[in-house]
Amino acid sequence: MLLYCTDIDNVTEEQYLTFLNTLNDSRRKKAERYKKYSDRVLSASSYVLLMYALHLNGDDGEHTILCNEHGKPFFENSNIHFNISHTEGAVACAVQNMPVGVDIQKKAEKFEAVMRRVCTEEEKKSVMSADDPQMEFTTLWTLKESILKCIGTGIAGQMKNYDFSENKTENGKFKLVSLYDDDIVLSACSTEPIVKVEKITVLELFEYCKSNMMKK
């Protein structure tokens, strides 16, 4: 299951506070540690989206989140795998019964220096010959990062090991999906196809939080 929300810029103060009050203490404190208000909103919204994804998956239990040696979060004592990502004004979350990675990014404005470090020669040609090189590069970046997040190495892994110049839906054992919403690119990766994809609104998250709080 892959959920994403692209109207996070529209979160009101009331909605943000409701999101915070829905989270447990550790997640709430993590969100509040960010200096910028927009980053606090993104952090809180990401965790609420995760809770909502679990709810839609039939799991309303409380889970302890730990991190592996590379910083990838996982649920303690659970066979549910998840991954979250956020960018300016948007959040995404994937929940699977196997490892999963997700990355969401706004279209890169300046990418040439980064492209030289992370793209193969064939991918560079693909980017520079594309109708929209910025969007093509952002797609490649999110695909690569989603794989590295899926296997749990993060961006410390070798991005050039994965070439998407010809195929953007499969790479070895990995199945991938990329979605586009105006200037936002979302890519997700797992070893099995992600068959359910939903776009969620801030209002839906807000209503979920209010309903969840009433049950407590």
Image: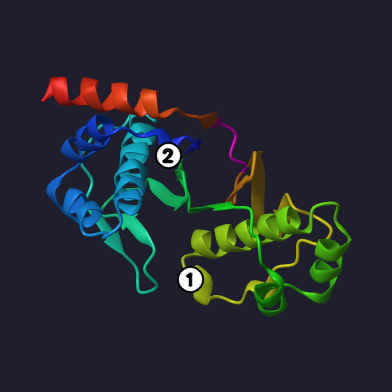
**The magenta segment:** 193-197
**Residue lying at 71% horizontally and 59% vertically, measured from the top left:** 171
Q: Is residue 180 above or below residue 70?
A: above
Residue 107 left/right relative to 93: right
Q: Is residue 204 magenta?
A: no
Residue 177 left/right relative to 80: right
**Numbered tag placed on residue 9 in the rendering:** 2
Front one among 45 and 172: 45
Mark 2–mark 1 distance (CA, rounded to whole Å): 30 Å
Colour scheme: rainbow
**Residue lying at 47% horizontally and 50% vertically, measured from the top left:** 88
Identify the image quadrant of residue 146: bottom right
**Residue lying at 66% horizontally and 45% vertically, measured from the top left:** 178
Mark 2 packing: few (<14 Cα in 10 Å), some, or many (20+)?
few
First along the sequence among labels 2 and 1: 2
Q: Is residue 1 visible?
A: no
Residue with the mark numbered 1: 153
Q: Are marks 2 and 1 in contact (CB under 8 Å)?
A: no
Secondary structure type for disc 1: loop
Identify the image quadrant of residue 71: bottom left
Residue type indicated by callout 1: Thr
Which marked residue is nearer to the observer: mark 2 or mark 1?
Answer: 2
Q: Is residue 157 visible?
A: yes
Q: Is residue 28 above or below residue 70?
A: above
Residue 17: percent from left, percent from top: 20, 36
Front one among 152 and 124: 124
